[in-house]
Every structure is written in C-alpha cells, then in structure tokens.
Amino acid sequence: MELEQLQKTAAEVADREDVKYVIGWKKGSYGYRVAPGFIEDAAGAAELIFSPLCTANLATYLTLVEKLPVPRGQEADDRKVAVMVKGCDSRAVAQLLVEKGIGREEVVVIGCPCPGVVDPELLAEKYPETEETVEIKWTEDGFLLVRGEEEIEISRDELLAEKCRLCRYPNPVISDVMLGEPVETRELVEDEGVAEIENRDVDERAAYWEEQFAKCVRCYSCRNVCPLCYCQDCILDRLNPTWVNRAVNFSENTAFNIARAFHLAGRCIECGECERVCPANIPLGRLNRKLAREVRDKYGFEPGVDPEAEPFQASFKPDDPEDFIL
Ligand code: SF4
Ligand code: SF4
Ligand code: SF4
C-alpha cells in the first residue's frame, strides 16, 4: 500500500461531514515508537503512516468514546468515527458489532491489508532503540530498517510477531474503504506456544501458570488495551460485592487472569495486544489462544469473522457438546 494513497484516503474521510475524526497510526516521538493519531481534518492526514511498527489495535478506541449527556437545547453529535484496521483489528470491529458494543452506523472502517508486524521486544533486543526516529518498511520477504543513512535488511522470520505467524485473517474482514491490494492468506498452522504447554503433565502446567500469574502486578493494562474488554461496570472495579480482591498475590492474580480469559472465550480475536502491553511478560496470548481453539474445535465458532453472527456466549446450537454437564 502506498503511503500517498493512505494519506489521500484518510484526508477524504476526515473531510466528510458525517465523520468526527479518523483514528490511524502516526510516528511516535522517538525510536520505534508509533502513536495513535486522531485526525480531524484533511491536513492532519499527512501525519498518518502504516508500517510493520503499527502493532496497536486502534479498534480499542471505539468503545472509549465518552458519551456525555447532551445539554438541553443542543443536538447530539451523531457523526461517525473512522478507524484504520489491520486484519486482526477488523475482527475486533466485527465482534463489537456482533455484541452491539458499537452500531454499524457509528463507524467507518478503513481496511489495511497487512503483511505482518514486528515483535517490538525482539526488535529492540536485536536492533537496540535509539533516540532518532527509525523507519521500518515491508519488503518482498521481510523488513527493511532505515536508520539515517543506514539500511538493514531483516528476514521475516527474524522479527515477525508470534500472532502474525498464526494469523489467518491478514485482510480486513469488514471495511468501508480498502487500502491497497489483499495480501496472501495463510493456512491454519500448529500453535507451537500452546502445544508446548499442552505437552506438559498437569503438575507441570500448574507450576508454569503459578509462576506466570505470580508475576502479575495487576496494572490492568491487559484489560484496558483489549478492544473486547469494554464492560462499563467491570467486576474488577467492584467493591460490593468484591469479586476479586485487590490484593496482589498468587490467588487473586489467578482469579483475575482466569476470569478475564474465560470472559473472552469465544470473543478474543487474537490481536495479541494484552500480551504486548503486559509489563510482566506473561504469555497471555497462549492462554487466550488455547480457549479460542477449544471454542473453535468444540463449537465451530470463531469470533469476529462474521459481523452478522450470534454472540457465542449468548447463543447455542442443538448439537453443541454437553458432555461436561453433570
Ligand atoms: S495478526 Fe494478522 S492482521 Fe494482525 S498484525 Fe499480524 S498479520 Fe497483521
Ligand atoms: S498487563 Fe500483565 S501485569 Fe498487568 S494486570 Fe494484565 S497480566 Fe497482570
Ligand atoms: S484478550 Fe488480548 S488478544 Fe484477545 S482481543 Fe483482547 S487484547 Fe486482543
């Protein structure tokens, strides 16, 4: 996709009378940083980019729009929010539509076919971040890092994010405007991260997750970044009754992480954002992908691929397995 085309399309959308602003990616202030950009007019669109550093799922912002009461005598602002989405991000939009978290008339979806993003941790480890702004571009079979005069070719396998190795929906599943040509889709491959844990015996698995959950500092970054964690009244914030105690210890951390994982079963669209932002490096993706696979294998349901689908946790089919019912 050409940058020029992206900025031109974003400018046209931002200028539409029925659009409040366009949410896209823009260069951050240093190094590899990319920040969300909220573009209100055509001129602002010149800031927008799309590169292998655009890891953030901007669909998260769709449910964060503050809906203040409209003062008497004034009209509500019913303009749409436009959002740029990669394939995985578009699944979040589709799932939000399924759950009626947003209405179709509230959003303009700008689809960005996605060749895959880099793993920011691996990138910083192998090519340490500097203060100067660095660019990374897609090439035929990998990435090109551009730092001042220097250009470094990097193979796809060296830096591709884990979620992208497993991705089957790199092309947006829903869009009003599509930027560029579709990219090649990939087959379902074995999830080695999940398989590695499944191959351990029960005691080893328990020890693994005990070690992982013990690291959780309960910052709730995973919840806050997740496009599908948007309940206005989250049980974690409740004091009466207190569902999960605020104490940061193994027991409460486990309750929190398991409750969140199960609340996202059949809803998580595997964008990997929770794991990316976790300061304790807990492999949340493995937990969520294990549940996603169980739902897919047992119930034939995949969230965020059909905006017209029934929500998994609020529907059933007569032939759903029920052998777990005592
Ligand atoms: S998971 Fe798919 S759509 Fe999402 S960033 Fe990776 S390749 Fe792109
Ligand atoms: S982001 Fe990580 S450390 Fe923070 S609450 Fe979530 S699991 Fe715990
Ligand atoms: S649980 Fe994590 S991977 Fe799943 S939708 Fe939320 S942020 Fe994305």
Image (spheres, helix red, strand yellow):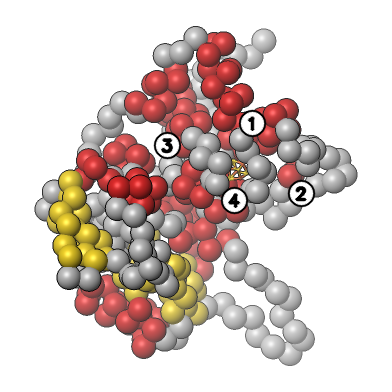
Circle 1 — which element? helix
Q: Amino acid at mark 1?
A: Ala
Quadrant assignment, res 11: bottom left
Disc 4, ligand 2: is the CB inside 8 Å? yes
Q: What kind of residue is marked 2?
A: Asp
Distance of mark 2 from mark 1, alpha carbons? 20 Å
Q: Is mark 2 within 8 Å of ligand 2?
A: no
**Is disc 2 placed on a helix, strand or loop?**
helix
Q: Is residue 189 left or right of residue 280?
A: left
**Residue receiving disc 3:** 302
Q: Position of residue 116 (x, y in %)?
A: 28, 50
Q: Amino acid at mark 3?
A: Glu
User: Is residue 129 toward the left or the right of residue 231 in the image?
Assistant: left
Of marks 4 and 1, the one in the foreground: 1
Q: Earlier in the sequence, mark 2 or mark 3?
A: 2
Q: Residue at x 44, y 45 (%)?
A: 272
Give how far apart the Cα atoms at labels 3 and 4 are.
25 Å
Q: Which residue is mark 2?
A: 237
Q: Quadrant of the C terminus?
A: top right
- Residue underneath mark 4: 221
Q: Are marks 2 and 1 in contact (CB under 8 Å)?
A: no
